[in-house]
């Protein structure tokens, strides 16, 4: 499962309302696709003066996942910095991922009328072994001291500040979970070129979200 798909399962937990139309979920998802490719060794972000790293494609061999292959094609088409790619991808990334999770029976779509006039669509997780295992893994890292692998560290870093995990954390331990997520976001990405590249993407997501707050990407 893609890191971006896991993010969506956390975002649309059936204990919360799910991202609103003004949410920054699309930017986090775009960053998750880039991080996935960094971890897989398909792209890199070589250090550059002033932190102006451009995304470099290392391997364009098809991954078997359409979303990742489209990111590779986009990154190879023209030189772009990570924030630029995050911004472009955010306009097209969310709905295909949602539809894919529905097809896998991991999300369900709920269409309803608001005040009998306006149509509203909500997405809800479908409880099962995949969702249960994801929640258990996240809980283990945040509250039980488990050491995350790169993918889980990326997942939690990209979810930091979203509030998506709070419904599954006991109220009295939410400060502890928030502290652990912040520690991962600030320290995990040191020590290897792959981690540093993924950390650069995560930083780009934070920057784009800050500059594009309340801007609704097309297609959501």
Image (cartoon, rainbow, N blue to C red):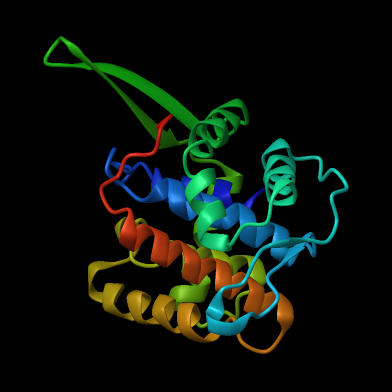
Along the horizontal axis of the image, is 115 left or right of 133? left
Q: How many numbered dots are placed on residues in this image?
A: 0
Query: What is the quadrant of residue 96 in the picture?
Result: top right
Residue 113 drawn at (x, y percent)? 22, 15
For image coordinates 83% across by 61% down, the residue present is 58
167 is higher (above) or lower (below) than 199: above
Q: Nearer the viewer, residue 108 or 213?
A: 213
For image coordinates 42% across by 75% down, the residue present is 181
For image coordinates 51% across by 50% down, the residue present is 29
Residue 101 drawn at (x, y percent)? 57, 34
- Asked whether the viewer can see residue 149, the reply is no
- Asked whether the viewer can see residue 107, the reply is yes
165 is higher (above) or lower (below) than 198: above
Residue 47 drawn at (x, y percent)? 66, 80
Along the horizontal axis of the image, is 183 left or right of 46? left
For image coordinates 75% across by 42% down, the residue present is 69
Quadrant for the C terminus in the image: top left
115 is higher (above) or lower (below) than 42: above
Residue 213 drawn at (x, y percent)? 28, 53
176 is higher (above) or lower (below) than 9: below
Along the horizontal axis of the image, is 79 left or right of 106? right
Q: Nearer the viewer, residue 42 or 98?
A: 42
Q: Residue furthest top?
A: 116
Q: Nearer the viewer, residue 213 or 7?
A: 213
Q: Residue furthest left?
A: 115
């Amino acid at each position: 499962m893609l890191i971006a798909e896991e993010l969506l399962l956390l975002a649309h937990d059936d204990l919360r309302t799910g991202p609103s139309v003004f949410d920054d979920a699309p930017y986090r998802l775009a960053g998750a696709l880039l991080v996935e490719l960094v971890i897989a060794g398909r792209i890199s972000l070589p250090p550059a003066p002033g932190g102006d790293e451009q995304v470099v494609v290392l391997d364009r061999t098809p991954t078997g996942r359409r979303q990742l292959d489209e990111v590779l094609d986009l990154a190879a088409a023209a030189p772009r910095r990570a924030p630029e790619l995050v911004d472009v991808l955010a306009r097209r990334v969310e709905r295909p991922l949602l539809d894919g999770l529905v097809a896998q029976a991991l999300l369900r779509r709920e269409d309803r009328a608001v005040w009998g006039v306006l149509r509203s669509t909500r997405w809800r997780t479908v409880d099962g072994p995949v969702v249960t295992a994801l929640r258990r893994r996240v809980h283990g890292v945040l509250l039980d001291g488990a050491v995350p692998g790169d993918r889980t560290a990326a997942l939690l870093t990209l979810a930091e500040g979203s509030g998506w995990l709070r419904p599954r954390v006991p109220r009295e331990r939410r400060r502890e979970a928030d502290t652990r997520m912040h520690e991962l976001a600030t320290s995990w990405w040191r020590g290897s070129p792959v981690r540093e590249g993924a950390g650069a993407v995560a930083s780009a997501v934070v920057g784009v979200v800050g500059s594009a707050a309340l801007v609704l990407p097309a297609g959501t």
